[in-house]
Image (spheres, rainbow, N blue to C red):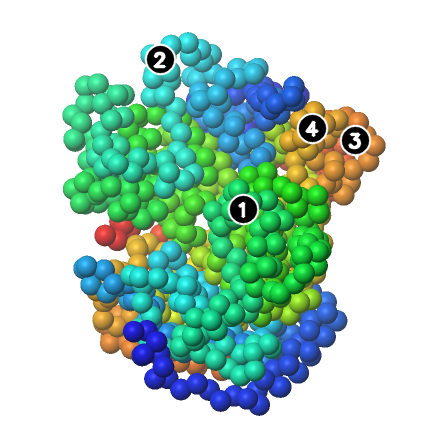
C-alpha cells in the first residue's frame, strides 16, 4: 500500500549532482580538518546547504492505524540531509521524530503505515538516486546498515546479551560485507580502536561494560560498514554529562575523519545547539521550524522552539527565569485545526486556527533557509509572560 | 574533617530535619574485594530547603540516598532524624521511619506497578501511614497537590495509560501520601523530556514550600541543581569532594572534578564550541577514566588523581580532607590554590548570591 502511493512521486534525475557532491565532500573535509574550533561553526553553517543531499525526504506521512482512528504521527514533512552534515531532529516524546527517521528507512511495521511521500537516497556507492520507499526487498537489504546505520537509544537492549563484543561486530560485518574471516576479525578490532575501547574488551559481554562503553560499541557497529548516513536516536540520553560529552566529541571526530552524515534525534535542544549544523524542530508530527543552529540560538522564530530554548537551566551567565512548556502535546488522532501548538502557546491569537503549517522563510532572518510554520511571531517578540520556575508560585494546571 | 565548622547553605531555610554523620557503605564484591560506595559522608537536611547531591553514575549518590531511606544497612556512621538517632530494628520502626522519610525514584516507568491503577498506588500508602484518614478524600487531595486534575479522570488509569510526566506525578503523590518531613528524590526528572523537567522541578519546589519538606535532590545535571538547590554537594567515588551554596559552586567551582562537571554540561551559548569543530574540548580535567574505587582495593591518595590535571605525588599518596574555603564552602583538594586561584585561600566572604 505504501509502495503504491509512494511510487507516484517522481524520482529526481539528479545524475550530475553526484559529481558535485563528491567535490563538496572533499572540500568540506579538507577545510574541516584545517580550521580550528572557533571557525568550525561558520564553516558548518556555510557548507551545509551547498553540499548535495544524501537523503531527501519529501512529503512523508506516517500514520498509526488504531481502532480509534488513524494517529497522524508524521504529517507531510520535508527534510534534507546534506553530505557530511549533522541535522538535529528535536522535539518532545511523541512528536514523531523517531517515527519520521524509522519511517524513512522503512523500519516501521504495522500498525504504522507510510501513507505518502518519497525518500531519495544518493550515496557514494549507489550509481543513481533511489527511492527507499519503493525499493525491492533485496535492494533495501543492501541499503540498510551498508548505507544507513542506526545507533539506538538503549544500548543495553540493542546489544545481544549472550554475544560478546567481537561476535556482535563480526555479525554485522558478515551480514553486510563480503570479507574473509581473519580480515573481519582485524576489522572488528580496529573498530574498537576507532571508538576508543581497548581491544581487550573484544571478549567482554554487554553486561560487563559501562553504559558509555556499550554506547561506544553501538557506534562501532554502526561504523562497521562505513555507512553514508548514521541515524542516532537519543544515543546519549541515558548517560551522564561527562560521558555524554566525551561520546559526542568522539562522534564529531569520527564524522570529520570518515565523512558520514548524521541525523541526530533528541529531545535536548541544548545538545543540538552545540552539535548540529542544522536543527529541525518537530511538534505533533510536523516541522515548526528549520534553521542552522546559530539561527535557532540567536533568533528562534517559533514559540515552541522558544519554549524549548527556555526549558533548560543554564550553568553560565546570570540566572534567568525559566518557563518550560506547560501542558502536553495534542491527541494526534484528532488534531486541532491550524497550528497544533495553540493550546500551549503564549502568543496564540484567534487566526492561529487557520494557519496551514507551511514552512516559510523568516522575514527578519539573514538566512533564507531559516523557515518556520508560525507566520505571526517575529524573532524579536518578547517572551510571553509565564511564571518563572522555582519561584514558588504555582504554575498553570496540567493541560488535560 | 573540618565539616563541623562549615555551615550549610541550606541552614537558613528552616530547622534541622535530618543529619547524616560520617556515613559509610562498603559492598563486598567477590573474592574478598570491597567496594567503598560511600565514604565518610556527612551532611544535613533542613526543613524547606533543597540539598543537591551531584555526581556521575557510580559516584555513590544513589547509595547515599538508599542509606538515608533505610534501604541499605550502614557500614558505619549515624543518621539522626529530628535530633534522635535512627534505630530501625523492627518492621514497625521501619514503617514509622518511612512515614517521615520518603524516596522518589528515577524511572517512573518501572517504579509503578503496571497491574495496579493510580488509585491503588495512592490508597495503599494512605491506609498504611494515616490510619484515621478519610482515604478517598486524602487521595483526591494528593492528586490536587501534584496537579493531576481532574482526579476522577486519572484515578482509574493504569501506569501505561499515563505519560512519563504524569507517572512521575503519581510517584510524587505516593511519596507525599505518608506526609513525610524528608523527601529523597533520586534523579526525579532525568528520565523525562527536557520540556517537562522544568515543570516537574517547579512542582517539586512548590511541594517543598507547601509541606516544608527537607529535600535531597540527587542528579548528574549540575545545571538543574544550580536553579533548584540551596546547597550543592559534589560526590566523586563515594566522597564529597566539594560543597557549598549552589550559585557559588556552579559559578566558581573549586575542585577540579566540579570544574569538569561544569565544563561538560551542554553550553548553548558557546556555539563555536569544540564539539562542532571536531576536536575535543580542552576540558580542565580528562573526561575518560572511571572512578577508581570500582576495581576493589581502596586506592591510595585522592580518588580523582588519575583524571586530574593538577595531580602530583602528594595527591597519589594522601587523600585530602575537606578544606574550608568560606563559612559555607569547602573542597577536598591539595591544590586549591592552583585549581581555583580566584577563590583565594580560605578568606572569601560567604557572599549571599543564592537567593532564588
Where disc 4 sits, the SS reads strand
Residue A130 left/right relative to A17: left
Where disc 1 sits, the SS reads loop
The answer to whether residue A400 is visible is: yes
* Residue on which disc 2 sits: B91
The answer to whether residue B12 is visible is: no
Mark 3 or 1, which is nearer the eye? 1
- Badge number at residue B323: 4
Residue A337 left/right relative to B343: left
> Which residue is depicted at the point 25% across and 63% down?
A65
- Badge number at residue B281: none
Label 1 packing within 10 angstroms: few (<14), some (14-19), many (20+): some
> Which residue is depicted at the point 44% across and 20% down?
B70
Q: Nearer the viewer, residue A222 or B62?
A: A222
> Which residue is depicted at the point 32% across and 36% down?
B112
Q: Nearer the viewer, residue A395 or A278?
A: A278
Amino acid at each position: 500500500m505504501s509502495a503504491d502511493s509512494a511510487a507516484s512521486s517522481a524520482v529526481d534525475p539528479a545524475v550530475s549532482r553526484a559529481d558535485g557532491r563528491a567535490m563538496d565532500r572533499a572540500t568540506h573535509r579538507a577545510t574541516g580538518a584545517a580550521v580550528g574550533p572557533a571557525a568550525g561553526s561558520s564553516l558548518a553553517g556555510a557548507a551545509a546547504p551547498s553540499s548535495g543531499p544524501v537523503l531527501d525526504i519529501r512529503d512523508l506521512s506516517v500514520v498509526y492505524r488504531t481502532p480509534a482512528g488513524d494517529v497522524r504521527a508524521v504529517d507531510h514533512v520535508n527534510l534534507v540531509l546534506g553530505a557530511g552534515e549533522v541535522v538535529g531532529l528535536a522535539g518532545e516524546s511523541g512528536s514523531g521524530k523517531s517515527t519520521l527517521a524509522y519511517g524513512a528507512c522503512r523500519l516501521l511495521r504495522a500498525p504504522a503505515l507510510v501513507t505518502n511521500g518519497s525518500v531519495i537516497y544518493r550515496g557514494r556507492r549507489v550509481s543513481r538516486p533511489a527511492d527507499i520507499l519503493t525499493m525491492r526487498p533485496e535492494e533495501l537489504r543492501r541499503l540498510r546498515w551498508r548505507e544507513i546505520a542506526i545507533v539506538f537509544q538503549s544500548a543495553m537492549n540493542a546489544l545481544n546479551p549472550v554475544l560478546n563484543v567481537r561476535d556482535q561486530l563480526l555479525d554485522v560485518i558478515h551480514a553486510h560485507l563480503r570479507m574473509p574471516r581473519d580480515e573481519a576479525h582485524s576489522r572488528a578490532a580496529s573498530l574498537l580502536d576507532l571508538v576508543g575501547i581497548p581491544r581487550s574488551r573484544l571478549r567482554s559481554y554487554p553486561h560487563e561494560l559501562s553504559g558509555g562503553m556499550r554506547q561506544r560499541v553501538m557506534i562501532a557497529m554502526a561504523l562497521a560498514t562505513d555507512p553514508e548516513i548514521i541515524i542516532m536516536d537519543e544515543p546519549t540520553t541515558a548517560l551522564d554529562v561527562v560521558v555524554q560529552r566525551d561520546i559526542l566529541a568522539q562522534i564529531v571526530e569520527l564524522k570529520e575523519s570518515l565523512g558520514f552524515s548524521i541525523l541526530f534525534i533528541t529531545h535536548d535542544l541544548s545538545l543540538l545547539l552545540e552539535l548540529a549544523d542544522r536543527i529541525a524542530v518537530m511538534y505533533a508530527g510536523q516541522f515548526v521550524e528549520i534553521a542552522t543552529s546559530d539561527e535557532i540560538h540567536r533568533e528562534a522564530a517559533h514559540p515552541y522552539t522558544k519554549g524549548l530554548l527556555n526549558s533548560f537551566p543554564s550553568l553560565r551567565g546570570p540566572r534567568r527565569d525559566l518557563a518550560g512548556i506547560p501542558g502536553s502535546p495534542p491527541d494526534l488522532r484528532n488534531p486541532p485545526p491550524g497550528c497544533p501548538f495553540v493550546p500551549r502557546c503564549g502568543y496564540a491569537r484567534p487566526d492561529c486556527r487557520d494557519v496551514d503549517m507551511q514552512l516559510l522563510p523568516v522575514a527578519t532572518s539573514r538566512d533564507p533557509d531559516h523557515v518556520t510554520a508560525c507566520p505571526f511571531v517575529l524573532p524579536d517578540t518578547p517572551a510571553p509572560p509565564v511564571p518563572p520556575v522555582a519561584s514558588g508560585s504555582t504554575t498553570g494546571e496540567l493541560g488535560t | 574533617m573540618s565539616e563541623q565548622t562549615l555551615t550549610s547553605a541550606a541552614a537558613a531555610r528552616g530547622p534541622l530535619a535530618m543529619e547524616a554523620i560520617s556515613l559509610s557503605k562498603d559492598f563486598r564484591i567477590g573474592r574478598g574485594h570491597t567496594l567503598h560506595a560511600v565514604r565518610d559522608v556527612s551532611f544535613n537536611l533542613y526543613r524547606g530547603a533543597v540539598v543537591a547531591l551531584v555526581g556521575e553514575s557510580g559516584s555513590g549518590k544513589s547509595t547515599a540516598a538508599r542509606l538515608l531511606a533505610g534501604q541499605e544497612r550502614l557500614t558505619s556512621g549515624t543518621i539522626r532524624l529530628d535530633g534522635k538517632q535512627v534505630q530501625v530494628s523492627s518492621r514497625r520502626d521501619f514503617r514509622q521511619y518511612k512515614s517521615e522519610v520518603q524516596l522518589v525514584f528515577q524511572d517512573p516507568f518501572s517504579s509503578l506497578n503496571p497491574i495496579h491503577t493510580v488509585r491503588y498506588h495512592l490508597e495503599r500508602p494512605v491506609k498504611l501511614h494515616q490510619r484515621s484518614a478519610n482515604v478517598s478524600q486524602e487521595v483526591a487531595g494528593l492528586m490536587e497537590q501534584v496537579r493531576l486534575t481532574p482526579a476522577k479522570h486519572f484515578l482509574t488509569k493504569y501506569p501505561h495509560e499515563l505519560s512519563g510526566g504524569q507517572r512521575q506525578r503519581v510517584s510524587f503523590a505516593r511519596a507525599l501520601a505518608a506526609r513525610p518531613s524528608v523527601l529523597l528524590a533520586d534523579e526525579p526528572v532525568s528520565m523525562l523530556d527536557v520540556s517537562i523537567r522544568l515543570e516537574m522541578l517547579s512542582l517539586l519546589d512548590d511541594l517543598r514550600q507547601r509541606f516544608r519538606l527537607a529535600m535531597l535532590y540527587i542528579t548528574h545535571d549540575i545545571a538543574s541543581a544550580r536553579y533548584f538547590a540551596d546547597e550543592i554537594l559534589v560526590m566523586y567515588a563515594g566522597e564529597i569532594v566539594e560543597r557549598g551554596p549552589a550559585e557559588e559552586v556552579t559559578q566558581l567551582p573549586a575542585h577540579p572534578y566540579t570544574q569538569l562537571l561544569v565544563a561538560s554540561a551542554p553550553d548553548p551559548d558557546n556555539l563555536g564550541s569544540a564539539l562542532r569543530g571536531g576536536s575535543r574540548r580542552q576540558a580542565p580535567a580528562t573526561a575518560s577514566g572511571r572512578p577508581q574505587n570500582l576495581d576493589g582495593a581502596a586506592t591510595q591518595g585522592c580518588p580523582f588523581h588519575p583524571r586530574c590535571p593538577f595531580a602530583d605525588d602528594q595527591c597519589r599518596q594522601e587523600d585530602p580532607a575537606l578544606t574550608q574555603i568560606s563559612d559555607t564552602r569547602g573542597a577536598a583538594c591539595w591544590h586549591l590554590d592552583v585549581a581555583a586561584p580566584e577563590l583565594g585561600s580560605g578568606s572569601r566572604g560567604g557572599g549571599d548570591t543564592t537567593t532564588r
